[in-house]
Image (spheres, grey):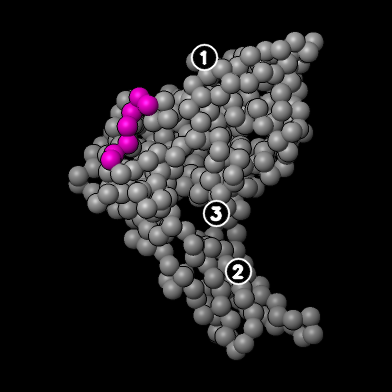
Amino acid sequence: MKCTNRICRKVVTLLLTGCMALSLTACSGRKFDMPYGSNTAASSFKVSPGGEEQFAECFASDICVVSSDLLDEEIDMSGAGAAVLFDVSGNEVLYSKNAHERLHPASLTKILTAIVALKYGSTDQVLTATRAINIDESGAQLCGLKVGDTMTLNQALNILLVYSANDVAMLIAEGVGGTVDHFIELMNEEAKALGATNSHFMNPHGLTQEEHYTTAYDLYLIFNEAVKNEKILEIIQKSNYETVYYDKNGKEKSFSHLSTNWYLRGEYKPPEAVSVVGGKTGTTNAAGHCLMILSRDTAGNPYISIVLRSEAREMVYTEMTDLLEKINK
C-alpha cells in the first residue's frame, strides 16, 4: 500500500463536486473556499493557483495512508491491539493491524508533549515545580520532583523521553503552557494540525483518563513529525541520562537512570540488518504495553513501527522484533 503524489493530487476544474467549492475574486487574486474540518471524511487540501488548471494537493501527498488492514501470516500480532510498520522514505505501508482503532497510548503521549514544548518553549528555559507535579496514581513513573525544584526545559525533556517521568510531564506542561489546561489545548491543536484527528488528549503524560485516546496511525503522524526535530531525535537515542537540578534552596539534586527502552539498553536485539535508532515506551493497565520505534535498514532508510496494547512487556518486544523482520523481506 503506497501513497504517492500521483495518487494524492486532484485536478480542480470549474465544476467541483462533493466537499469543495471554488470562487474567484478580482484584483486580489483567486479565493478558494475549502469546507474542511477535523470531522470531515476527507484530508485537507492546499491549493496552488496559476494557469488554467488548479491543483489541490491532499494532506497525504508525502505520508503513508492506511485504508484497511495489511497483515502478514508470518507475523503473530494476536496479542496486540494494534500494530503498524511504515517505510518512511518510500511512503509505503508494510504492515497494518487496527491502525485506526482508538486506544489508550500511555506514555507514547509524551512524544506529542515534547513537540509542543519545543514549539512554544526554549531549551534553556528554567521550569519551577508547583503542586501540579503531584501525581498519586499507584505505580506511576516519577522523577521525584518536589515543589520548588528547578530544571531547564532541556533537562526536563531528557527525563521525559528517556525515563518517562510523569511528574516532569506536568512540570513541562505548566512551565511552557502557563497552565496545564492550556498546554493540553495546544497538544490537541497540534495533533489536529498534523492530521491526527482521531485522537484526543487529556493530559501531557498518558496516565489513564477516559477521553484520552489515539490510534496507531495518528501516533505515526505525530512520531513522524517528532523525529524531524533534532532535539527529540537526539534524546530518543539515549540509553541513559544523568543530570543535576536544584531544590527550592538551590541545593543540587542528582538524576541518573537508564532508558525505559530495552532495545537501547541491550536487553533485546533487533533483527540482523536493522538498527533501532530510538523511540518511546508506554505502559498502563488500560493501555497495556506500548512501543514506538524509529529504525533504519543497512542503506540508512528510516522506518516507523508501533505496537499498542500488547499483553506483556516481553511480548511487546517480541512482537516488535517480528515486525522489524519484515524490513528485510
In the rendered image, the vertical position of residue 185 relative to residue 12, given as above or below: above
Give neighbour class at mark 3: few <14, some 14-19, many 20+ (Cα, 10 Å).
some
Give the residue number, with chain letter if any, for mark 1.
138
Give neighbour class at mark 2: few <14, some 14-19, many 20+ (Cα, 10 Å).
few
State the extent of the magenta-drawn residues as a range: 266-272
At label 2, which amino acid type do we have? Lys
Foreground mark, 1 or 2, reads 2
The span from disc 1 to disc 3 (Cα, nearest Å) is 34 Å
The span from disc 1 to disc 2 (Cα, nearest Å) is 47 Å
Give neighbour class at mark 1: few <14, some 14-19, many 20+ (Cα, 10 Å).
few
Q: Which mark is residue 46?
A: 2
Callout 2–callout 3 Cβ contact below 8 Å: no
Residue drawn at (40%, 43%), measured in percent from left and top?
295
Q: Nearer the viewer, residue 111 or 131?
A: 111
Residue drawn at (30%, 44%), measured in percent from left and top?
273
Looking at marks 2 and 3 on the same chain, the residue that comes earlier in the sequence is marked by 2
Q: Quadrant of residue 315?
A: top left
Residue 68, percent across and down?
Answer: 34, 55
In the rendered image, the vertical position of residue 231 relative to residue 68, given as above or below: above
As drawn, the residue found furthest toward the front would be 299
Q: Is residue 246 visible?
A: yes
Q: Nearer the viewer, residue 21 or 54?
A: 54
At label 1, which amino acid type do we have? Ser
At label 3, which amino acid type do we have? Gly
Q: Nearer the viewer, residue 159 or 289?
A: 159
Q: Which mark is residue 195?
A: 3
Residue 6, percent across and down?
Answer: 44, 73
- The majority secondary structure of the magenta stretch comes to loop
Image side of residue 61 versus residue 204, left or right: left
Residue drawn at (52%, 19%), measured in percent from left and top?
257
